[in-house]
Image (tube, rainbow, N blue to C red):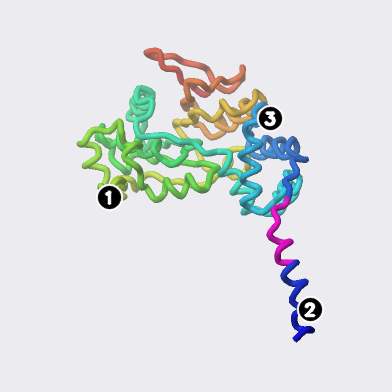
Amino acid sequence: MWFWNKKKAPEVALKHEATVPQEFNTFGLNDLLHYIKREIGVDLLSKNSVIETKLRLFCERKEIYSFRKLFETLQHDKSLRQDLIDLVTVNETYFYREETQLDLAVHFALAIPNVKILCAPCASGEEVYSLSMMLQDKNKNLREFSITGIDINAEAIAKAQEGLFSERSLHKLDQRLKDKFFNHEDRFYRVKKEYFSSVSFTKVNIFEHEFLSLGKYDIVFSRNMLIYFDDDFRLKAIERFANLLKPEGKLFLGHADIIPENNFFVKHTENRLSYYVKKS
């Protein structure tokens, strides 16, 4: 009996030691922020005091206790990399956001046979569905247009594909549009898939090679993404948009997005709304 108790004591001690929280080591934060900027273009270096807490909580949820260890693990763990991307690219939006700009794009789209539109990033899909609804409301047949939504955030793409939205997301829609395009489910609205066979969503990073293989488009929407980039990444992004646009294709940006001088686009203004046309 004495021998049995003797053997159990170390196990209890070891178990107690394992429950002691590890002290977090903040070494390696700058390397991590440079990695995020290099891989997805998002510049968090000027916001490191704000992002540090967010990244630290992310690490602790993953039982990683230093930024350096996170940086090293990211080099080979694709699942962890995607989780980190999802953390730093959360973007909330709603239907018919900046409606006058959407109206202008729809005006151009109605004049183009079999028009192809790209939304990059598309967040959780509200912009893509909004453009589709507006085109259909103008009697554009589903077979006469296609809209592709892309985003680097896997959770956002999954939500867009599911097509389930809160009442808040639909706050700008009148009852006619809600009744026509959605089924009401408790406090949520689900898109009626039969109206959206011409839209698709896929996870793509605009800075990776697969982006350039998406095809050619007449109109590209990229609202409120460039504000997170520095000038080098902004220039790189609009060059890639130019590669995907057809001759005279149009690029719509967010009101806060600023692009550096370039040889790819000419800025136009119509009724105080700005857009960019690809140079021939």
Please check the rendered image and state whether residue 166 is part of the magenta-colored stretch, yes or no.
no
Please check the rendered image and state whether residue 18 is part of the magenta-colored stretch, yes or no.
yes
Q: Is residue 117 left or right of residue 138?
A: right
Q: Is residue 210 left or right of residue 165?
A: right
Residue 130: x and y in percent read: 35, 35
Of the residues shown, which amino acid type is indicated by label 2?
Lys
Provide the residue designation for mark 2: 6
Of the residues shown, which amino acid type is indicated by label 3?
Leu
Residue 217: x and y in percent read: 47, 35
Could you say which disc has been placed on residue 172 in the image? none
Provide the residue designation for mark 3: 45
At x 62% / y 31%, what residue is drawn?
Answer: 50
Provide the residue designation for mark 1: 185
Label 2 neighbour load within 10 Å: few <14, some 14-19, many 20+: few
Residue 99: x and y in percent read: 35, 26
Q: CA distance from mark 1 to mark 3?
A: 42 Å
The residue range painted magenta reads: 14-22
Task: Tell which of 80 and 211 is nearer to you.
Answer: 80
